[in-house]
Image (cartoon, helix red, strand yellow):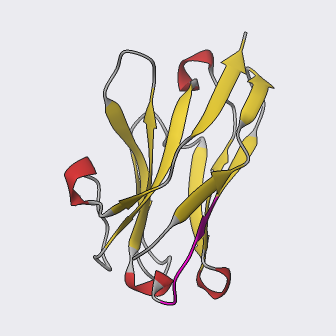
């Protein structure tokens, strides 16, 4: 069992930056691929970024490429999402997720554990 808790969300102006953190419980954190998703009101939950077990490989949605960076610290059971050059359309609830897979995982249905979500609001 893995429990995930996101932090670092909030309100930021367009063009600004935020760093989301996802703290995981359990001793097998390094056995999981990690991902970030987001869901805007009235829309489906969309993939944002994923990272493999070691942090050596990452993959991003087109909307995140060049602006967002996913990383992980296996010693501290934490995954991060650094978000730069934020746009109004990045406004959403952001979710951290863990998949029992050491490779890259992008599908919502492939993730086994989810955080409760955290609000990110970008104002114009």
Q: Is residue 43 above or below residue 102?
A: above
Q: Above or below — where is 17 with respect to 29? A: above
Residue ID at (27%, 49%): 108
Residue 71 visible here: yes
Q: Residue furthest top?
A: 124
Work out whether 1 lies above or below 11: below
Please report the bounds of the magenta region as a residue range. Answer: 22-27
Q: At 53% from the left edge and 40% from the top edge, which residue is drawn? A: 94
Camera-side residue: 62 or 104? 104
Q: Quadrant of the N terminus?
A: bottom left
Relative image position of residue 5 (x, y in whole percent): 60, 58
Where does the image place residue 53, in percent across and percent down from the top left?
42, 80
Magenta highlight on residue 123 = no
Residue at x 74% of width, y 41% of height: 18
Residue 21 versus residue 119 in the image, above or below: below
Residue at 69% across / 21% down in the picture? 122
Whether residue 81 is visible to the viewer of this picture, yes or no, is: no
Q: Is residue 2 left or right of residue 25?
A: left
Q: Say which of 58 and 120 sits in front.
A: 120
Q: How many marks?
A: 0
Quarter occupied by residue 121: top right
Task: Using residue 61 as the reference point, say whether residue 79 is left or right of it.
Answer: right
Q: Quadrant of the C terminus?
A: top right
Q: Please provide percent x and percent y for residue 91.
A: 58, 23
Q: Is residue 25 magenta?
A: yes
Percent across and percent down for residue 76 are 67, 81
């Amino acid at each position: 069992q893995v429990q995930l808790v996101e932090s670092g969300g909030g309100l930021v102006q367009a063009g600004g930056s935020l760093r989301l953190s996802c703290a995981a419980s359990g001793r097998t954190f390094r056995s999981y691929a990690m991902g970030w998703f987001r869901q805007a009101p009235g829309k489906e939950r969309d993939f944002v970024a994923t990272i493999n077990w070691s942090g050596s490989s990452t993959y991003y949605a087109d909307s995140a490429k060049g602006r967002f960076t996913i990383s992980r610290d296996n010693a501290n059971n934490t995954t991060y999402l650094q978000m730069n050059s934020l746009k109004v359309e990045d406004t959403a609830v952001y979710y951290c997720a863990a998949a029992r897979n050491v490779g890259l995982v992008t599908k919502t249905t492939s993730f086994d554990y989810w955080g409760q979500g955290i609000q990110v609001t970008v104002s114009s």
